[in-house]
Image: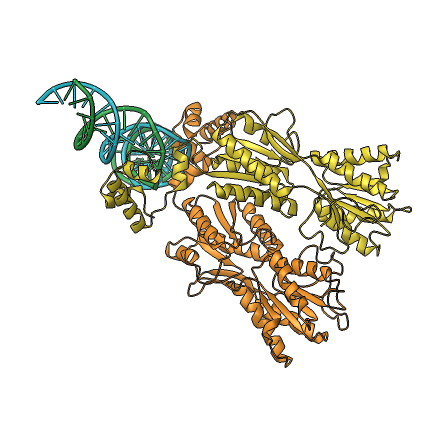
Chain colours: A orange, B yellow, C cyan, D green
DNA sequence: ATACAAATTGTAAACGTTTACATCGTCTAA
DNA sequence: TTAGACGATGTAAACGTTTACAATTTGTAT
């Protein structure tokens, strides 16, 4: 591959000059610029991003890292699209790392990204005490958190009001006269799981329904755990008449189990999933779900990171977005008032 | 961030020695090695991947690039998981780029990856004439293609027998007494779209059913085009009684349209989708689909790339995997003989 | 003891950029 | 005419590694 030097030779100038026209620095003779550009074309010159990054420590790499917990979860796919669109528009490349809910893998990836000298990171921390992510602050590496915050650390953060979203969902279920509502939680170490549980509890309280231990199950945020825990729930002597599922994948799993038990939705059992999916309305029956503005979350996070890279010391920002209850047909139909798709 | 030099100072050795213990070269005094390791720990030293990559041109970067056409398509997610698992196991990091079926974006990303000096690439080329991908061969950059081949270029390739998969699906439909089968194609420039159409045609021929132009629609491989084209199809005076959909996203779109038209599956209309999805069996009714071993495709591709990086001149390999018709309930039930999930 | 091989470590160049600084004309204003 | 400013370009150091080569020490066989 041709390098700066080769181009310089061909154009009969010094490498500094070539560098200048590449970064269109001021004070370059038009004729020189032209010659250099010709030479670059002729040799199909493409700058080495790594050399560039190595040399200019100052955020010139145009490269960011994104660390997500589970790429098989459609929610994160949408988040990634949002990030990608923004970053692509700003000429940044992104390295996406999927740590599969495996904290060790997460640590490994963050290390790798840091040693790639990325300009910044967007991370969904494994949990609030995530030391690896916390360390980023000390090392002065720009980063923004999504979906989950960090305890005792100031950092940009974009997420959704999980407690409220869950509260609305469960309240809705209660209003639809469901009496025994179960909650299938994702990994308990993930703050969102707990916040959603809080919303669940608050709704119950408000309706004067006692909280019952056997109605909440804790899993690992995977489809499989959705399947298994729904089985446990539905096998109970006096089984729940509605399910509130803690994420996308759990919902899919629960749906499978419900089919396996031959239960009719929404008559035999109602279900609301946290996280909407493109095809939720295609499901049969269409799924009532708590929608997070995933794409938007990604986009805002990207924007925040971009700003921070440009201006490392601006104050931290926390963006809390609203969820939206997408009322479809997996819950009884009576008072269907809110938005529909 | 501490560098080689700092560690060397602390340990009282030269940077070369430090480098040696890092890459555990032979012939190092145990005591020295120990001192150096202590120093590294103490300073929380992490090597700079970029410096390393810059210096040692020879595939030491442990970094690959992956370029996929559409990250919102679950098929590619599974492929990515396969790649990721293999690469993670071999200590490689991967940069994933999603070009959203946009050829210009694809070119841009490939350039960027090359100038990141990745050790190799896994690419699903936009089409068979993809010059950017072809160029990789000339530049001697290790790469392997997935899902789609390249015309007149020898390269490692992992894909599925699309023609056969489609043939089997459509034959099955025909055997189930569906008479008027429509095909919704993805982007026509993608070889798989054409191969699948060929399979469709061959099945028709074999059953002596004339091919009818108005029964095949060409779209852009997106869910939206699935929705729109299914609408066109179902609006016809004498509408088709079965749909064969060219990919995941199209299938989802078509399902939505079918629901919109209030049609019953499989009575009013049958449907088989190319590409299975984790939740296909959860759909109502469970979706009959042509399954590609997506994860395996990714894994094998990763393996091939890994090998090629180690041994750039080994002969090219083309791996053609089998599809599997997952017979579920979106087609009539009569002769359900084959596998089920 | 002697010579040569092996083991261990160090020195310095190189990878492809950016960038501070120097150089050298050419203008402009006095 | 000349000093200073400005425009255009070049020189060389630096970024953090790897690695060829040199240097030194140690060991071994004679």
Whether residue A127 is visible? yes
x 47%, y 55%: residue: A103
x 71%, y 51%: residue: B280
Give x and y (percent) for residue A339.
72, 66
Quick check: A146 above or below A63?
A: below
- Residue lying furthest bottom: A208
Q: Which quarter of the figure has residue A170? A: bottom right
In the picture, the quarter occupied by the C terminus of chain A is bottom right
Whether residue A26 is visible? no
Comparing A32 with A227, the one in front is A227
Q: Is residue A264 shown left or right of residue A140?
A: right
| Tag count | 0
Quick check: C22 above or below A257?
A: above
Give x and y (percent) for residue A287.
71, 62
Comparing B238 with B32, the one in front is B32
- Residue lying furthest right: B237
x 63%, y 42%: residue: B294
x 56%, y 53%: residue: A70
Give x and y (percent) for residue A300.
55, 57
Q: Is residue A101 shown left or right of residue A326?
A: left
Comparing B147 with B69, the one in front is B147
Quick check: B332 above or below A291?
A: above
Q: Is residue B221 shown left or right of residue A212?
A: right
Comparing A228 with B97, the one in front is A228
Give x and y (percent) for residue A106.
47, 52
Q: Is residue D25 shown left or right of residue B190?
A: left
């Amino acid at each position: 591959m041709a390098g700066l030097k080769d181009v310089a030779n061909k154009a009969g100038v010094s490498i500094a000059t070539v560098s200048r026209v590449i970064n269109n620095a001021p004070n370059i003779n038009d004729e020189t610029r032209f010659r250099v550009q010709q030479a670059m074309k002729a040799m199909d010159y493409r700058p080495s991003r790594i050399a560039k990054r190595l040399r200019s420590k100052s955020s010139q790499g145009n490269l960011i890292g994104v660390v997500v917990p589970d790429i098989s979860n459609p929610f994160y796919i949408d988040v990634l699209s949002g990030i990608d669109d923004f970053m692509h528009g700003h000429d940044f490349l992104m390295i996406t790392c999927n740590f599969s809910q495996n904290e060790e893998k997460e640590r490994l990836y963050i290390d790798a990204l840091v040693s790639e000298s990325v300009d910044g990171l967007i991370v969904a921390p494994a949990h609030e005490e995530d030391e690896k992510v916390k360390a980023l602050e000390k090392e002065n590496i720009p980063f923004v958190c999504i979906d989950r915050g960090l305890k005792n650390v100031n950092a940009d953060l974009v997420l959704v009001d999980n407690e409220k979203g869950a509260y609305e969902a469960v309240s809705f279920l209660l209003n639809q006269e469901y009496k025994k509502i179960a909650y299938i939680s994702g990994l308990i170490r993930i703050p969102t799981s707990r916040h959603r549980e809080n919303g669940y509890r608050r709704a119950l309280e408000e309706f004067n329904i006692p909280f019952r231990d056997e109605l909440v199950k804790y899993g690992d945020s995977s489809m499989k755990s959705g399947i298994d825990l729904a089985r446990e729930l539905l096998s109970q002597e006096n089984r729940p008449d509605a399910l509130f599922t803690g994420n996308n994948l759990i919902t899919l799993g629960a749906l499978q189990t419900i089919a396996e038990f031959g239960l009719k939705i929404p008559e035999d059992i109602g279900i609301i999933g946290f996280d909407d999916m493109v095809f939720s309305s295609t499901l049969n029956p269409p799924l009532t779900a708590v929608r997070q503005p995933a794409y938007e979350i990604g986009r805002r996070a990207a924007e925040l990171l971009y700003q921070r890279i440009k201006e490392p010391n601006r104050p931290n920002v926390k963006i809390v977005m609203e969820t939206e209850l997408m009322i479809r047909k997996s819950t009884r139909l009576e008072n269907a008032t809110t938005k529909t798709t």
